[in-house]
Image: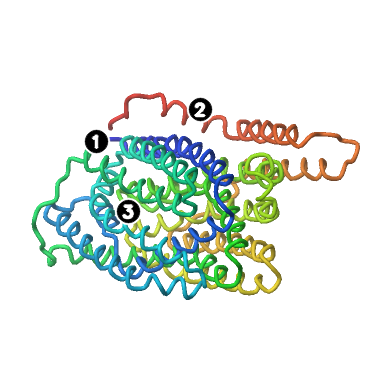
Amino acid sequence: MINLKKKTIKGGLFLTITNVITQIFAIILNVILARLLLVEDFGIIALASTYLGFITLFTSIGFGSAVIHNNEATKDQISTLYWLNFILSIFSLFVVILTAPLASTYYSEPLITPVILISSVSLILFPFFIIHQKLLERDLRYDLIGKIIVFATLISSVIAVCAAYMNYGVFALVAQMISMSVIKLVLTLYYSKWKPKFVFRLTEVKSMVWFALRYKTAQGTLYIERNIDYLILGKIFSPTILGYYSFSYNIMYTPVKRISNVFNDVLFPSLSKLKNNPKKIIQAYFQSKQLIAMVVFPIMVIVAFNAELIISYVFGDKWEEAIPILRILCFAGAFQSISQFGSAIFNSVGKPEKSISIAIIRSILTVVAIVVGSWYGILMVAYLLLATKILSWLIVLLAIRFEIHYDFYDIWKCLKGTMVCVITLCLFEVLFENVIYLEISLLLKFILQILIASSLIMCFYKKIIIDLFRIIVSNKIETN
């Protein structure tokens, strides 16, 4: 029997390595596209993607979660879910085509409709491979998944740059989305051993459909919480202002998504195998939180304190108005990184509905923050969103404790090294800003902060880093 802990860690490391590589691609791509495209192009694609996401949120279920949760699903059951998923995807596409003009009317932006219609091509591609992908996730085949993601990211990035260079504007971003789906489709089907059978036995998958519905509802409320800002801000502010916000949010959220989502993807299938052992589940949760915090928090703080350097010298002067927004959102992203994968706990124990009430509360807080903040401008929106993210993290911790008991001291134990690092970086920034005689260039300050953060993280988490390195270089997974 394969050692689940090591297989989980190794799977997480494979995805982490994958996400580091794709993160590099994303940074390079963002730099190039930021110089080739207009500010409003990023605002339009944000609005179109959000609208598309909201429509599919209510017209699809997504049965991949049921495949992962039910480790003993039969071939007939999985095939039934495959065809059911396909039918619902066609329905989603039909609804999107009918309602796309409403988006242009709502946002008063004619270009949104063609962007949505072209982007919706991905909807019909998605059901062809998503079950295959979820089966690979269920079996923790993250080495193969990682290779597919890296290749798809590389090719789609090249396509996007070429399209932007040829003056296709916002459609360069659309081309990236579609090409990413096409490449994932081809490679996943090529490497997957599973083939769907021509069977449709709905009675045999009732429990799986019920779980998928609950899971989808939970994920849907999380999606609303994370994207409600675009839905509201797109109506209040111009595409240009939304472009600055979207650009800043993407810079902030990219490392959060690349790192935090890794653990969310790995924890769900892994913890599903431990659903009857709460002690091990909460232990894995805090270990994951520790790993995420020790990477994301220093990165976000350094980016926040060096936003002027990064924006001005990397992306160009036309993005200067995004600097103060980015500074605030970086701190919001840090707290979001350690709160957003909490749903893996509830999903793994078969109670995804627990995430629903949490997401609803957080959505209400987000809406209030956006509406109130919009009276004073986009910066106030960013400040209130930061407060919302901190409060949301506390809500998740309390909800998990209600489900699986733990000591509050466990929170401090897993975050103390990270907090010392963050406080030290903050003190260094204050020293730099207020001690006039300390003449340090922006670039040197940036380098010094990286060295400080790296040294402190190594000091506090040396053993963990060494253990992770050993797992990376290990070619064998121990068996019991």
Are there few (<14), some (14-19), or many (20+) residues within 10 Å of tag 1? Answer: few
Residue at image point 91% right, 36% down: 437
Whole-percent x, y for residue 298 in the image: 63, 42
Quarter of the figure that contains the N terminus: top left
**Cα separation between marks 1 and 3:** 18 Å
Residue at image point 61% right, 74% down: 371
Nearer to us: label 3 or label 2: 2
Q: Which circle marks residue 466 in the picture? A: 2
Foreground of the two, 51 or 303: 51
Are there few (<14), some (14-19), or many (20+) residues within 10 Å of tag 2? Answer: few
Q: Could you tell me if the residues under marks 2 and 1 are in contact, i.e. CB atoms within 8 Å?
A: no
Relative side of 308 to 171, left or right: right
**Residue 8 placement: quadrant:** top left
**Cα separation between marks 3 and 2:** 29 Å
Question: Residue flagged by tag 2: what amino acid is it?
Answer: Ile
Are there few (<14), some (14-19), or many (20+) residues within 10 Å of tag 3? Answer: some
1 or 3: tag closer to the N-terminus:
1
Secondary element type, mark 3: loop
Whole-percent x, y for residue 392 in the image: 55, 63
Q: Which circle marks residue 275 in the picture? A: 3
Question: Residue flagged by tag 1: what amino acid is it?
Answer: Met
Residue at image point 31% right, 57% down: 121
